[in-house]
Image: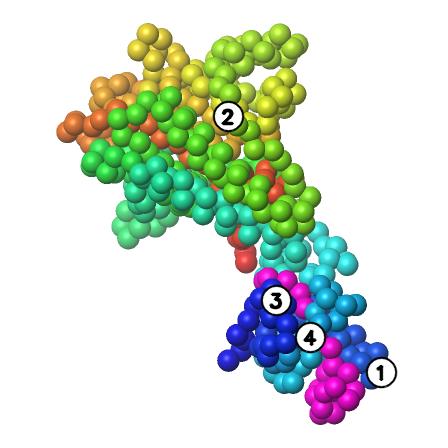
Amino acid sequence: MFRNYYIKDAKNSKGKQVIVAGWVHEFRNIGKVRFIVLRDKTGFVQVTAKKGAVSDSLLEQFQFNREDVLSISGKVVENSIAPDGVEIIPEKIEILNKVERKLPVDPSDVVPSDLDIRLDFRYIDLRRKIPNSIFNVKSAIAQAFREKVLELGFQEIHPTSLTGAATEGGTDVFAVEYFDKKAFLAQSPQLYKQLAVIGGMDKVFMITPVFRAEKHATTTHLNEIIQMDVEIGFADHLEAMDILEKVFLHILKKIHSMKNELSILNADFEVPKAVKKYTYDEVISLLNENNFKIAWGEDLSKDAEKKLDEIITEDAYFIHEWPTNTRAFYSMPKEEKEDVCNAFDLIYKGLEISSGAQRIHIPALLEKALIKRNLDPKDFQFYIDAFRVGAPPHSGWSIGLERITQKLTNQSNIRECMLFPRDRYRLNP
């Protein structure tokens, strides 16, 4: 047995014999007393070998490098000057692996490393406190999302990541060889979650990777991301926003309780009681009234989003009823005004973290929307045909997992929030 306790649990087991395992975070040799600070995913514990308290053979063995991997058997005892007031007196130490080269990244953070170096050696970078806390938070976000949508009666599905057409009608797709056919990595699970609703599954959700071949180099974009998606049968965009608000606030409450991680990350936020809704028209008026000139029909630039964040004091808010030409082809236009559609975004701390819409479920409207964007309806025939056999009205949305993680963990670069990020220049490790 390599261990029977995580360090966190071992420190609460005073007087007991334990076996812990992890990495040598620190090692000190002070003559007759030698110390290890051992680290695992749950924390740190001091291991003390003092001449007379342990065997001479064990004391002689007590020579280690930082990041050596050990399994230590011993007794947990009180020591008021040790971290957390406890230490382990070792009885047996098994060396599971030795460090054989100079560490390119310092897990203790005494010596800082550039982001690119840390990502090149991510498997060492993850041993640092900050990345460990980021991915604890990210895991909790995904768990909170799944908790709430299950509570709301959604069913989990697993759509394909391979498709025979650009799923959002764009050109920024990754082409792959698929036997003798041309295929693409999915830009979105959009079409497939709609097909599930048309199939009668009614309320579905998924957590899935998506791929976008956009040649950007920003701190808020990646070429592979994880989306947390839902699709809702017999629902318009207003109901979809209401469900998104419930899920979003549940996530915030869950993460707000993670005091240790938020302290390590120097991250702080308040959980609002509700998320205010602004129409696109209201947003354009606010910008123009505050000396930021923008014409109706324009998408919001980064500068516009920054200015809007200064004007609107809430951390989180919706923008809905967007110009139809700024949204995906499948967004449902309003009956009384076709140049406006039932689409929405959720903005959090100045960044769009979610978008969605009521979908077009009428085949003739879909064909019309595709042609307006210079897309050939024949390329989407399998999709359009699905709406010819009784498709209900439906709506949906997605939350970018890395983006919400970036904001909740107070990170300036989204690459910190993907375990192994893929961008225009990075394909390894």
Given residues 186 and 315, the one toward you in this image is 315
Cα distance between the residues tagged 2 and 1:
61 Å
Category of crowding for the residue at label 3, using alpha-carbon neighbours closer than 10 angstroms: few (below 14), some (14–19), many (at least 20) = few
Cα distance between the residues tagged 4 and 2:
49 Å
Cα distance between the residues tagged 3 and 2:
40 Å
Given residues 217 and 127, the one toward you in this image is 127
The amino acid type, in three-letter code, at marker 1 is: Gly
Q: Quadrant of residue 234?
A: top left
The amino acid type, in three-letter code, at marker 3 is: Asn
Q: Quadrant of residue 393?
A: top left
Point out the stretch of residues depicted in magenta. Answer: 41-63
- Asked if residue 389 is positioned above or below residue 421 in the image, the reply reads above
Category of crowding for the residue at label 2, using alpha-carbon neighbours closer than 10 angstroms: few (below 14), some (14–19), many (at least 20) = few
Check disc 1 and report the residue beneath it. 31
Q: For residue 77, which numbered disc appears in the image?
A: 4
Cα distance between the residues tagged 4 and 1:
22 Å
The amino acid type, in three-letter code, at marker 4 is: Val
Q: For residue 274, which numbered disc appears in the image?
A: 2
Quarter containing the C terminus = bottom right
